[in-house]
């Protein structure tokens, strides 16, 4: 971008919280100096914490996440944990990294486990209605428009539609979209997603 372009993020927007692992300095003959900073987020810490002899009763997935985080000393002020819907069986957790175990809990819940930009560990239960309070995007788009990075396209015929209805049964809401040009050219291929 040119020097006249507006910044993609306001100067005050925090996009990462973590730890510096290393500083690699490089100098060129023409006087250019660069520093490559390798950073780690909370997942690096979790990957290096081995859970040992944590006795867990049958409990909801959110309680299990809190139990494991407490066993490794992760502060309550640095976590945000949903209750969860899945009841996990009683077990003694031992010899596994906190990251590996908590990732399995998230998979069992069909939820999400991640570290946000402020370094807060978050566990989100399945079917959570996202109000974008957890995700703040700042960009040059008009207000109210959001984008998602790293979208992979699937062009297989059985997954391509030109008329789609999206529903949210929890809120009794729906939205639809259709491409008239595509329907006229290829015929209507419709689907409904919850």
Image (cartoon, rainbow, N blue to C red):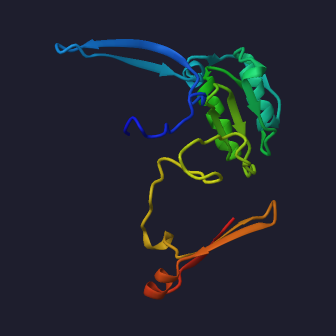
Residue at (67%, 16%) from the top-left corner? Answer: 52
Q: Is residue 103 left or right of residue 172?
A: left
**Placement of the N terminus among the 4 image quadrants:** top left
Tell me residue 172's x, y (percent).
81, 66
Residue 129 can be seen, yes or no: yes
Q: Which of the two residues, 6 or 115, is positioned nearer the viewer here?
A: 6
Locate residue 113: give its quadrant.
top right
Residue 89 can be seen, yes or no: no
Tell me residue 43's x, y (percent).
57, 25
Q: Which of the two residues, 132 or 33, is positioned nearer the viewer here?
A: 33
Q: Which of the two residues, 176 or 108, is positioned nearer the viewer here?
A: 176
Q: Is residue 153 above or below residue 12?
A: below
**Placement of the C terminus among the 4 image quadrants:** bottom right
Q: Is residue 85 left or right of residue 12?
A: right
Residue at (46%, 14%) from the top-left corner? Answer: 21
Q: Residue furthest front?
A: 4
Tell me residue 24's x, y (percent).
35, 13
Q: Is residue 184 above or below residue 1?
A: below
Tell me residue 69's x, y (percent).
72, 22
Marks counted in the figure total 0
Q: Residue furthest left?
A: 29
Residue at (50%, 84%) from the top-left corner? Answer: 183
Residue at (68%, 26%) from the top-left corner? Answer: 120
Q: Is residue 13 left or right of residue 30?
A: right
């Amino acid at each position: 971008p040119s020097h006249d372009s507006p910044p993609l993020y306001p100067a005050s927007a925090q996009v990462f919280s973590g730890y510096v692992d290393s500083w690699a300095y490089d100098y060129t003959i023409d006087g250019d100096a660069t520093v490559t900073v390798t950073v780690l987020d909370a997942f690096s810490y979790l990957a290096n914490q081995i859970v040992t002899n944590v006795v867990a009763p049958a409990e909801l997935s959110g309680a299990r996440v809190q139990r494991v985080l407490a066993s490794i000393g992760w502060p309550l002020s640095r976590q945000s944990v949903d209750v969860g819907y899945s009841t996990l069986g009683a077990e003694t957790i031992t010899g596994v990294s906190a990251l590996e175990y908590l990732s399995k809990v998230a998979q069992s819940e069909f939820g999400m486990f991640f570290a946000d930009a402020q370094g807060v560990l978050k566990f989100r239960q399945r079917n959570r209605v996202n109000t974008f309070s957890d995700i703040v995007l700042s960009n040059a788009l008009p207000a109210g428009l959001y984008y998602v990075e790293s979208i992979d396209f699937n062009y297989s015929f059985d997954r391509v539609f030109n008329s789609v209805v999206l529903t949210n049964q929890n809120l009794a809401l729906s939205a639809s979209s259709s491409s008239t040009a595509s329907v006229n050219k290829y015929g209507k291929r419709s689907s409904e997603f919850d």
